Each structure stands twice: as C-alpha cells, then as structure tokens.
Image (cartoon, helix red, strand yellow):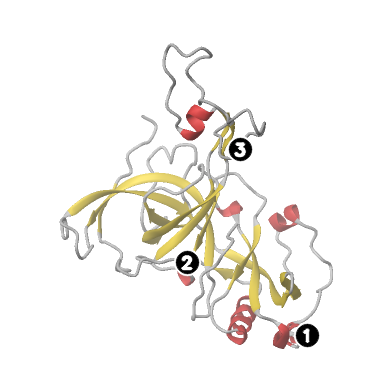
Amino acid sequence: MVKNWADRKEAKLLGFAGYKAGMISIVVVDNQPKSPTKGEELKKAVTIIESPPLKVLGIRLHKATPYGVKVLGEVWAHLQDKGLARRLDLPEKPNGTLEQLKQKLPQAVEVRVLVYTQPRDTGIGKKTPEIFEIPIGGSVEEQFTYASSILGKEIPVTEVFKAGQYVDVHAVSKGKGFEGDIKRYGVKLANHKSEFGVRHRATMGPITPPVTGWWVLQPGQMGFHKRTDYNKQIIKISDAKTTNVNPVSGISRYGLVKNTFVLVGGSVPGAKKRLVMLSAPIRQNRILPEQAPDISFISTRSQQG
C-alpha cells in the first residue's frame, strides 16, 4: 500500500494500520505558534481510526539487485491464529531459524517484518486479517535486533506513534463507479443550445492525426484509487475504555469502537471499515510543532439524524 517509506534513525516500525470508523467533532485549544487564534478554543473535525495491535508474523531480509530490492531470506513465527488460516496456508514446520537468517545479514540492505491485523477484536464483523510488510528504522543490524525481539508478539500503536506527531495517511478512496466527464473532472456544462446535450466536453482533438490524446477528458472509473494525505497530525491516542468517542447508538455504519484508537486531524481517504495505513511523514513540515493540542470537549452526538 505504501510505495515509499521515510528514513528514521530510531529502530522501530515506520508504520501502523487501522480501520476507519468515521468522523466526529472536538473542541481543542489552538497551540499553533503564529496562529491569530492561539490560546483560543476551536472546533475541529477529526477522524477515528480504530487500531488494534498488529501481530508480527515473520522477518524478511532484502538484498539489492540490478532489478530492484528482492527477498534474501525470511523466518516465520509459529502462529496458529484462526483468522490467519483464512488468509494463507500456515506451514507445519518452521522454515528456518533466526541463527540461519542472521548468517545472511551481511548481504542484506534492509530488514522488514511481516505483520497482520486483528479485525476480530473490532466490531466491523470481519474475520480475515490483512498481511503486509512494514520496514524498520535504524541500521541493518539494529533493524534485525529489533525485529528478532518482536517476532510473534503484538505491537500496539503507542510503540510506533505518539500524540502530536505528524503522519502520512494511505488508503483507497471511496468508489464512485463509471462516471461521466462532468462529474469526474468538473467540466463546465456546455451552452443550453448545444446540439448533443450539455453534459459533455468539447472537441476530442483534430481530424489529423486521427488519434485521441491521453489529455482529453473522457468518462471512466471514478474513485476507488489509492491515495495519500500528507502531514496529518495525530490529535490523541487513547483506549475506548479511557476516552469515550462512541455515540449512544454507535457510530453510523460502523458500530462501537472497542480498542485503542487514533484521532487524526481532518478527513482521510476511504470509506468506513476500510483499512488505513499510517506511516512516518516522507516530507514533513518542520515548522509545525509536534505537540498535540489540549482537548476540552469530544462530541458524542448521535449521527443517525
């Protein structure tokens, strides 16, 4: 899901994943240094991302080749989770040991861990987990040492991110299906006296050459694309038992948030219940302070109305 990862000196995971629950409004005290409303209370829209712990399935070493980075070797933990068997066939015997994998470390340029989500712990009614790779910061030796220490264990979101930090959000946007060029690109409606209707663009190009250029706006698939939002601030990381964000009737089209959740400022791509990936910012804004604003009120008004 993430094409490029940021480099970090600290040996820890560079990303985390959760499920989009929905949006609520909160009241925070503005802490931006040059803001004209600094120190005042502001109403802010935030997105709730329910983030149960990720479980580490395996360790992978990658080597550099003329055709890109390729897998050098891997070791899996001996896990027998029921949900994991829905996604893949678990090996009956271990495919190697950490000692054998460590011998290949001099050839490696990067160490990544295989992790999977635990949707059973949420209320979305899903049992099959997602499996993906997440890289680790630091040198190759530090990456391998850290990966070995977390193999087969659960990693909470608090070990990866903290409140106030900025992250990049990766997700698949809402699908709109096959749409015309008016809705797809925002083309202006033609004159009401137009011969073939008003909901179409103008010429598709010259007669010679008889080729339609790629730049010509045409109908097609709209939405359901992978998108990235840069520099979203984490407002709060908390547990549902400590901080209540659930309306009495539950979040519309999602249900109740039962686990640790992340409040991310603003909106993020994707529909409710969709997997959302949080990663360390690849082009971070150094001017903004990494200090979470104080929350004075969280709205739990019902979203059914």
Q: Dot 3 corresponds to which residue?
A: 213
- Label 1: which residue? 100
Residue shown at 67% from the left, 51% from the top: 128
Q: Quadrant of residue 223?
A: top right
Q: Is residue 123 left or right of residue 31?
A: right
Report x, y in % for residue 251: 43, 41
Label 1: which secondary element: helix
Give the mark, 1 or 2, whose residue is nearer the N terminus. Answer: 1
Front tag of 3 and 1: 3
Report the front residue among 260 and 163. Answer: 163
Work out how far the residue at label 3 is from the one at label 1, CA to CA, in angstroms.
55 Å
Which disc, if any, is residue 215?
A: none
Q: Is residue 98 left or right of residue 265?
A: right
Instruction: Give the quadrant of the N terminus.
Output: bottom right
Amino acid type at image mark 1: Gln
Q: Which residue is mark 2?
A: 282
Relative to 40, is 70 above or below?
Answer: below
Q: Quadrant of residue 285?
A: bottom left
Given this view, does label 1 or label 2 mark the residue nearer the observer? Answer: 2
Q: CA distance from mark 1 to mark 2?
A: 34 Å
Q: For residue 247, which quarter of the picture? A: top left
**Contact (Cβ within 8 Å) of mark 3 with mark 1:** no
Q: Earlier in the sequence, mark 3 or mark 1?
A: 1
Residue 125 rendering spot, x and y as whole percentages: 60, 44
Picture residue at 54% right of the left edge, 59% below the top: 17
Check disc 3 and give the amino acid type. Answer: Gly
